[in-house]
Image (spheres, rainbow, N blue to C red):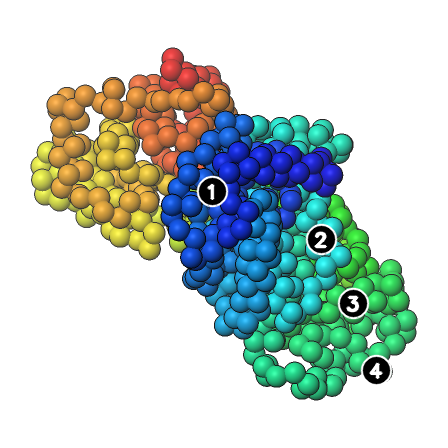
């Protein structure tokens, strides 16, 4: 698919429209058929609509138009073309464009098809003149419109399912750039923008041919066949090609909008002299709202100059002039095998700058200057995340992690180590193994080159190797189990490393997606970190870590008198509630409580169960963290008693459902994860009733569930259960295998 193909489609459509106008006996004067939007630009994709407007002078009588309208559209419809048509007077065209920015953008590409060419020329001139006259007043609204669209659609360069047209850096932004050029207020780097726009049009043409539909979203399964049509090696190459184009257009758009902002904020008259250079740091100055080199700069003799310019730009949230970055990439002195101390400090300043980091980093990428700072970046450049939890590609996620970590530097003793660990934590992605394992030696080599000493390099390597440890352990293991605490303590080794790992865990999760760092998840991580810190302090003192005692829960008199009854309390939490249930201790109690919660469609996140006595009565207590804050304790108690009495039929209501394409469940036993219990890990399609069915299957085997830890990764639930014999501790091997088989059977419908 090329520009010639689009032009040929447009010319064929032009002939069709002209023939339809002639067949409808359209007037030669006072009326014209015009194309707008993409059709107006002569860039029809295979499945594009024909956006046409029948325009008439204001004084044309309806009696002249009526017979034309009766005959004009049918030949277009009969041809099988998708037609988006309208009929307007010249005054209506002007008024509509004045009221609606989207209409105005479409009218800027207005093109004659048939009828009165003088009307078309006059109308086009009017629309363009109106746009230029009103540009200063209308550009702020256009900027808001663009930002609102970006908020909804995400970035073409980084979204998991990008939209070639609507995403930031897509074809819609390219159209906006053309409109900004038409104002005569700002210059746009048109070479880079136009080249990227034409290449995106080629991609859209291939997508339409592939799918046979007019949509512009690229689904994950589409990348491989799209690559074949584009002549690229594979789906990953196709992703990188498309995302590179999107990043380039995003970069040009950001620079252009900054210039627009400068124009709107400055004087509206011409002839005002631009301010001269304002020195910011050695060799670095401010000019025209951008960070540039001053007259004293000597790139070939100053290896830290690029990082100095970057740090100044990011900290002041100013753009780094692309020409400056490109010059430094060409002429700058190399940083060497071991950086100067100043260069390392400047890198940390850049990474800790917060939101100002992103546009500066993008300029480094677009100009090739980043290769001189971090050649390892090529591994993850525009690399897609496999996990649906992530909203960005790997490289953008890393930058967002640095931005998030910048807000946490006051919580740690070594902010420089945190900043660099955030930059390098996912550097192992792009390989074939565990990215944490593969990333550690890469991070160590990079940190050594940056000038960190051996202990600091070891600390950065530890953070990269274990950056998922706290999040994974907190959501899938019992933080009160000494084995869990000891395993984490063995990995982090020191309180300082633990503090840094807590901050990196939070920054990594916040950068992944808004849901990845909920109050609930944060509480789990901090609870585990508190246990590990206590263990590390105890180790340093040569004493045993303090044991965590089970909570004593008040027992109502009614439950003490009749252990078959139950008591429920619901305590609100910042992002849900904690449900505490108390009843007579027995095997199967947890299954019944989970059934009650499932009947209420409560989303369970975690559960713990323990025993306590009250006046000689053995009681079972369970605490459930749920996402639903509005549960009624009285309703829960009534449901429980009805369930125990057999007055509620749960088979159909709590049946496990499956959908085509669901993966089979995975059930694994981890004997090493605890000395006092057997750990059963269940991975299955996320369903509200999974916890109940697992607990019920285990109860039928007379196995006690001491705790359950529930997490969701995209469409998959990862549930971990700590199991014990009813009268002893961990399960023997045969019983553990029997439990795994029973759970697997119930989850597969056995």
Residue 91 at least partly seen: yes
| Disc on the earlier residue, 1 or 2 | 1
Figure label count: 4
x 78%, y 69%: residue: 324
Q: Is residue 360 left or right of residue 737?
A: right
The disc placed on residue 194 is: 2
| Disc on the earlier residue, 1 or 3 | 1
Quadrant of res 586: top left
| Disc on the earlier residue, 4 or 3 | 4
Q: Nearer the viewer, residue 736 or 58?
A: 58
The residue indicated by pointer 4 is 295
The residue indicated by pointer 3 is 323
The disc placed on residue 85 is: 1
Q: Is residue 494 left or right of residue 248?
A: left
Spatial CA span between label 2 and label 4: 33 Å
Circle 2 SS class: helix
Question: Marks 1 and 3: which is nearer the front?
Answer: 1
Question: Marks 1 and 4: which is nearer the front?
Answer: 1
Spatial CA span between label 1 and label 4: 58 Å
Question: Marks 2 and 4: which is nearer the front?
Answer: 2
């Amino acid at each position: 698919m090329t520009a010639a193909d689009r032009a040929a489609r447009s010319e064929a459509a032009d002939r069709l429209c002209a023939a339809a106008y002639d067949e409808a006996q359209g007037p030669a004067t006072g009326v014209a058929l015009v194309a707008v939007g993409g059709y107006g630009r002569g860039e029809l994709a295979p499945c594009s609509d024909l956006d046409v407007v029948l325009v008439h002078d204001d004084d044309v009588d309806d009696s002249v138009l009526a017979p034309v309208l009766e005959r004009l559209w049918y030949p277009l419809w009969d041809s099988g073309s998708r037609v988006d048509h309208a009929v307007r007077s010249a005054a209506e065209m002007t008024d509509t464009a004045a009221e609606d920015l989207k209409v105005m953008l479409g009218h800027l590409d207005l093109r004659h098809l048939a009828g009165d060419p003088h009307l078309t020329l006059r109308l086009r001139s009017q629309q363009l003149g109106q746009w230029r006259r009103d540009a200063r007043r209308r550009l702020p609204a256009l900027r808001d419109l663009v930002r609102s669209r970006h908020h909804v659609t995400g970035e073409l360069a980084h979204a998991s399912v990008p939209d070639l047209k609507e995403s930031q850096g897509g074809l819609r932004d390219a159209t906006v750039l053309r409109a900004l050029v038409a104002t005569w207020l700002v210059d746009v780097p048109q070479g880079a923008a136009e080249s990227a726009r034409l290449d995106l049009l080629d991609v859209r043409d291939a997508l339409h041919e592939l799918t046979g539909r007019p949509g512009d979203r690229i689904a994950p399964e589409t990348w491989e066949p799209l690559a074949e049509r584009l002549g690229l090696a594979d789906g990953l190459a196709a992703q990188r090609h498309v995302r590179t184009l999107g990043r380039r257009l995003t970069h040009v758009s950001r620079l252009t909008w900054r210039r627009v902002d400068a124009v709107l904020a400055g004087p509206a008259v011409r002839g005002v002299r631009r301010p001269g250079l304002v020195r910011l740091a050695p060799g670095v100055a401010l000019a025209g709202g951008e960070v540039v080199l001053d007259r004293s700069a000597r790139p070939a003799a100053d290896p830290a100059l690029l990082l100095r310019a970057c740090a100044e730009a990011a900290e002041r949230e100013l753009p780094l002039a692309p020409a400056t970055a490109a010059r430094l990439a060409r002429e700058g002195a190399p940083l060497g095998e071991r950086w100067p101390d100043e260069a390392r400090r400047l890198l940390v300043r850049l990474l800790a700058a917060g939101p100002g980091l992103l546009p500066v980093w993008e300029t480094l990428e677009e100009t090739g200057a980043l290769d001189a700072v971090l050649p390892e970046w090529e591994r993850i450049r525009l690399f897609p995340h496999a996990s649906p939890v992530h909203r960005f590609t790997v490289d953008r996620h890393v930058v967002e992690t640095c931005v998030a970590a910048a807000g946490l530097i006051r919580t740690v003793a070594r902010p420089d180590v945190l900043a660099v660990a955030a930059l390098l934590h996912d550097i192992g992605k792009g390989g074939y193994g565990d990215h944490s394992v593969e990333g550690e030696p890469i991070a160590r080599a990079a940190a050594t080159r940056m000038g960190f000493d051996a202990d600091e390099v070891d600390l950065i390597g530890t953070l990269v190797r274990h950056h998922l440890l706290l999040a994974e352990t907190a959501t899938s293991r019992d933080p009160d189990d000494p084995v869990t605490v000891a395993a984490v303590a063995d990995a982090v080794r020191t309180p300082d490393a633990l503090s840094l790992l807590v901050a990196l865990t939070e920054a990594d999760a916040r950068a992944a997606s808004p849901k990845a760092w909920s109050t609930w998840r944060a509480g789990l991580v901090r609870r585990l970190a508190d246990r590990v810190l206590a263990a590390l302090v105890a180790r340093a003192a040569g004493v045993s870590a303090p044991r965590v005692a089970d909570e004593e829960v008040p027992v109502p008199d009614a439950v003490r008198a009749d252990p078959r009854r139950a008591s429920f309390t619901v305590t609100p939490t910042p992002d849900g509630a904690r449900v505490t249930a108390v009843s007579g201790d027995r095997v199967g109690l947890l299954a019944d409580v989970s059934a009650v919660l499932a009947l209420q469609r409560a989303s369970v996140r975690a559960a713990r169960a323990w025993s306590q006595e009250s006046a000689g009565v053995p009681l079972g207590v369970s605490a459930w963290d749920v996402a639903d804050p509005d549960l009624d304790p009285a309703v829960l108690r009534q449901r429980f008693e009805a369930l125990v009495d057999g007055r509620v039929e749960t088979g159909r209501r709590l049946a496990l459902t499956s959908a085509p394409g669901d993966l089979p469940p995975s059930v694994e036993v981890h004997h090493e994860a605890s000395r006092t219990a057997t750990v059963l890990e269940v991975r299955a399609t996320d369903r509200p009733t999974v916890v109940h069915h697992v607990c019920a299957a285990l109860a039928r085997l007379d196995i006690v569930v001491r705790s359950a830890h529930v997490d969701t990764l995209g469409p998959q639930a990862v549930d971990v259960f700590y199991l014990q014999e009813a009268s002893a501790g961990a399960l023997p091997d045969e019983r553990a295998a029997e439990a795994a088989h029973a759970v697997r059977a119930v989850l597969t419908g056995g």
